[in-house]
Amino acid sequence: MKKMTAMLLTIGMVLSLIACGGGSGGVESDTDKAEEAGNAAGAGSADDVSGETNITFACWAEGAEKEFVETLIEQYNEAHDGVTVEAQFIPYAEYLSKMNILAAAGNMPEVFTMIEGNVFEWGEKGAVLDLRPLYDALGEDPYDTILDADIFDDGEHIYALGANTTTICLYYNKELLEAAGIEAPSGDASNPWSWEEFIENAQKLTTDTNGKHPTEEGFDKDNIVVYGATAPTGWVNLMALLKTNGIGFVSEDGKTLEISSEEGIEVIQAVADMSQKYYCAPTTLEVKSSFSDLNVMLMDGQIAMIISGAWSLSNYVREGFDVGVAQIPAFSQPANATWTGGICMSPDAADNAEAFEFFRFYTDYANSLQVAKENGVALGGLPHSKIVYDDAAQMQDWISTFKGIDATDICYTLKSILEHDGTRLGENVTTKNFYAIVNSSVVSALDDVWLGNADAREVLESIDVSSQLEGSWLATE
Amino acid sequence: MMNNRKKSIKKPLSNLERRQLKWGYFFIGPGIIGLLLFNFGPMLFSLGISLTKWDVLTTPEFIGLHNYAALFRDPLVRKSLSVTAYYTLLSVPLVTLVPFLIAMLLNTKVKGLSIFRTIFYLPSIVPAVASAAIWMYIYNPTGSGLLNSILNAIGLPNYSFLYSVKGVIPSLAVMAVWATGNTVVVYLAGLQGISGQLYEAAKIDGANAIARYWHITVPMMTPVIFYNLVMAVINAMQTFTQAYIMTDGGPVNNSLFYSLLVYRKAFQESSMGYAAAMSWVLFIIVALLTAVIFRFSGKWVFYENGD
């Protein structure tokens, strides 16, 4: 009897030890990361024995976008018996690490979105499926229906299609502009405000507790009630602004650093000056430590203008807020950037017909449009289908998906931006090693400029990324 | 000593001893298996990866010691080492000595002692992410932050704390003291293990409170202080969570802790081999530091029963 109990106890201990591993007071993060990996592995797809196919779809959508994706998938599941698509939402900040873990564990979802800058990299390494053969077998050509900028094609393989086109735009609070007597910026992408005009207007819109503007005597910069604008210090916004000065972070062939040129210094210094010299924007400290959403602040009338991505649009639409949208102010020429997150398939799903069918469903604009119209949810991004921009009736359909506001001006402005010659494919897609270059070196160095500790010139001229420049993904044009 | 002599005579084990030995191995077996499978195994694997170039998606490519050579030249690695060293230098004394003082306070006979002990212990069980959120509020660089509102009230300007190039590491070091509940408990146990007779004898000899503290309490506690010192150094060198959540290595890489850089290299830049090499370098550094501390421990650590 005693031996029996001893045996059972031992087996119990062995099992619990194996379950918990041998971690002994190591850093907390180790166990956290291990847990995450365990969860990720568990959440990967699992084909049911009962003949029902399960497809996992991973993406980083949140807020209004997330609602849209969930509705889309629900509709697909209802219409397709025997196939269940399960959505996995992973926060954007951890998206790449989580995907890496899933890839390592051999548990890739069948269909997933991929950060635009990593699509080509993963394609080259064989971590995403080449879709060209699949389309060829069907006799279809994605170029017929989808915007060129939204097809991840390196000349030979198609690694992803986009479904959430996006670009950068200038959002503005119409009431505040009217009250200050400022004429709204035009919806024509070839006729934006110049940067000087933008700053002038931002100053006119900035008021302190006494109602004074930065250009007036007695302006109290420590007690500002309404800010004219926000300083677009994020790399996405900078990427588009640099284009308006004829350059990028990196040259088009990906071989030289361009942000440290005179034009680049001009742009960076101008953005820093917004809060440090012209007092028309909050400082980075104020923005980083504020718990308020910038979009909410615009809607509340605390900020008059924001330069941000088209993805923020749904935040305004959801609240029924009639936000103004315009082309971004230009330094020397009207320009912008466009790109899309890629929708890819896992190489393991090469023979999975149901997965490919869901892929085509998800990337077919008509389905997104239908879901948006029927369920009153805003579209995740801008339409990626050529037909929308060419056909007035289709434009009207798109406009009607925005419930609660008249989105005619907004849609035509965005159409104008997307079709404009100066709107180029974003470097985050084309330049190799973009994130290592921008995030590790440029962005952290720029902290000093935004904090007011150093000049743009000093900082930019001392950046050395020569070891990280690897060229461009696209075959030389 | 008698024991040594006994060991050198090899006597065959009796049946009873053999059986007990068997049960002994049987019971420590799971622990050993766990250690081998989940600790040593992965460590060897990591050593193996550190000799390769691997991005998880493709097969590893053997490149010998190239990763190690590259990381000695990498300015980011050097920066992260200096950041981590600076943090260790600031936080270890705080995290080793402040809990000692707190434990002394908690060892006195005051009313509501157990409540005080609970209060001082609670912060250490708050999850890292929650405590990060709390401290971000305390350290908020605008006037609405807790510390800044206190500074403003006494007429001082705002301080950027975590967003300040010079102030980020000191801010994090001070934050570390908040979560030292465990260390306080260990010290408390040590304090209570000091025999009361020593104090009585000293009092009879006319020693005042300060003399009793310096000549009895502190020397008797040196083993515990030593233990906490070693643990503090090992943990400080591996700091990750605070940097990851609160500052993301900023501003201008001034809180780019070594572990954070390893994480970035591994999971954002997919350079697994490089990250593994970095981890092994950290291991060697921490091992050397620990060895140095042990080596010099004889000079100041006093063990009651001899070494």
Image (cartoon, grey):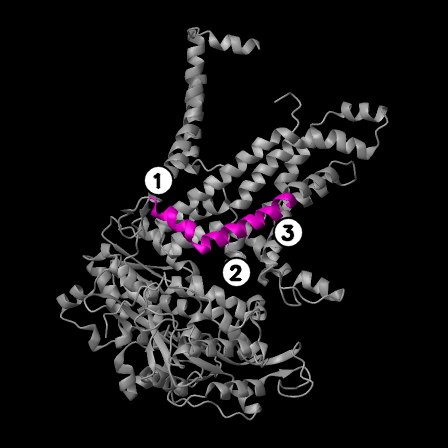
Asked whether residue B104 appears in the rendered view, the answer is yes
Q: CA distance from mark 2 to mark 1?
A: 32 Å
Question: What residue type is disc 1 on?
Answer: Phe
Q: Is residue B141 left or right of residue A168?
A: right
Question: What residue type is disc 3 on?
Answer: Val
Residue occupied by mark 3: B174
Residue shown at 59% from the left, 70% from the top:
A286
Q: CA distance from mark 2 to mark 3?
A: 18 Å
Q: Are marks 2 and 3 on the same chain?
A: yes
Q: Is residue A362 above or below residue B269?
A: below
Residue occupied by mark 2: B250
The prevailing secondary structure element of the residues shown in magenta is helix
Q: Are marks 2 and 1 in contact (CB under 8 Å)?
A: no
Asked whether residue A42 appears in the rendered view, the answer is no
Q: Is residue A177 above or below residue A47?
A: below
Q: Which residues are magenta?
A: B65-94
**Number of numbered discs on residues:** 3
Question: What residue type is disc 2 on?
Answer: Gly
Q: Which badge, 2 or 3, comes first in the chain's sequence?
A: 3
The secondary structure type at the circle numbered 2 is: loop
In the image, B6 versus A374, the foreground residue is: B6
Q: Is residue B156 above or below residue A352?
A: below
Q: Residues within 10 Å of mark 3 (few under 14, many from 20)?
A: some
